[in-house]
Amino acid sequence: MFAEQSLGEWTNTLLIYKFALDEINTKIKILNEEFTLNHEHNPIEHIKSRIKKPESIIQKLERKGLDLTQENIEHHINDVAGVRISCSFISDIYKIYDLLRQQDDIYIIEVKDYIKNPKPNGYKSFHMIIEIPIFLASETKKVKVEIQIRTVAMDFWASLEHKIFYKYNKKVPKEILESLNEASATVNSLDFKMESIKNQLEHLAEV
């Protein structure tokens, strides 16, 4: 199926998502620099972005029982373009969410709060599917981008979990799954402890 689209067609298909990443990365970098220069605390620790590889796009369409077409990619795959923001504290996650949703040209399609409602395996993160306008020479296109916001501790756990599932081809031994769940609880406890310390420091600063 990969051969059904030429290299030129794939380039054109994915280029629009690169433009969308450029737009949202610029917005996040502006917030990052503003907080660094003008505020005592910057909620943004790290920013990563990526475009999904053609092979992954094809596999996702196949799992959905869909043909490889531009229309199906645009309408049925929300994470071709993805941005991950790492923060120090849980409250930073919701701060960034509030700042992004207040921007006039960002339209939020879907929000999944896996912090308040973790996945059964212990995964925690805040996910947004947004749509952002891209102004081309001949038209304006609205392009979807997935944004994941999580603490540094959550990001470390998710990275480890991903590596383990890849290593075992998703057939992870029961004892490893139990250890991952225990580690998730530890991460959660650490995040809340760090949040408590931050709140104590802020309170002392006001006294």
Image (cartoon, rainbow, N blue to C red):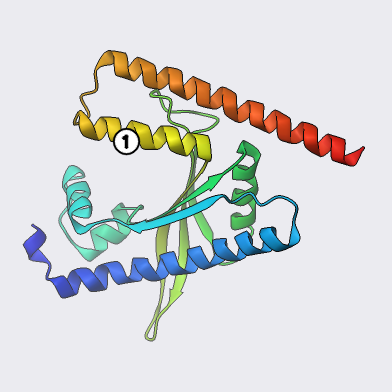
Rendered location of residue 190, percent (x, y): 58, 26
The quadrant in which the C terminus is found is top right
Rendered location of residue 191, percent (x, y): 59, 30
Residue on which disc 1 sits: 162
Q: In this view, does 114 lie to the left or right of 2?
A: right
Residue reaching furthest to the bottom: 137
**Residue at x 31%, y 18% (from the top left corner):** 176
- What's the residue type where badge 1 is placed? His
Q: Is residue 24 left or right of residue 7?
A: right
Rendered location of residue 45, percent (x, y): 56, 49
Query: Is residue 180 among what the camera can see?
Result: yes
Query: Is residue 103 among what the camera can see?
Result: no
Q: In this view, does 118 lie to the left or right of 71?
A: right
Give the answer, above or below, for where 141 lies relative to 28.
Answer: below
Residue reaching furthest to the right: 207
Q: Is residue 17 left or right of residue 132?
A: left
Instruction: Report the number of discs.
Output: 1
> Tag 1, which secondary structure?
helix
Give the answer, above or below, for where 35 lies relative to 110.
Answer: below
Between residue 38 and residue 130, name the one nearer to us. Answer: 38
**Residue at x 34%, y 70% (from the top left corner):** 16
Give the answer, above or below, for where 190 lies relative to 19.
Answer: above
Rendered location of residue 67, percent (x, y): 15, 55
**Residue at x 44%, y 17% (from the top left corner):** 182
Q: Residues within 10 Å of mark 1 (few under 14, many from 20)?
A: few
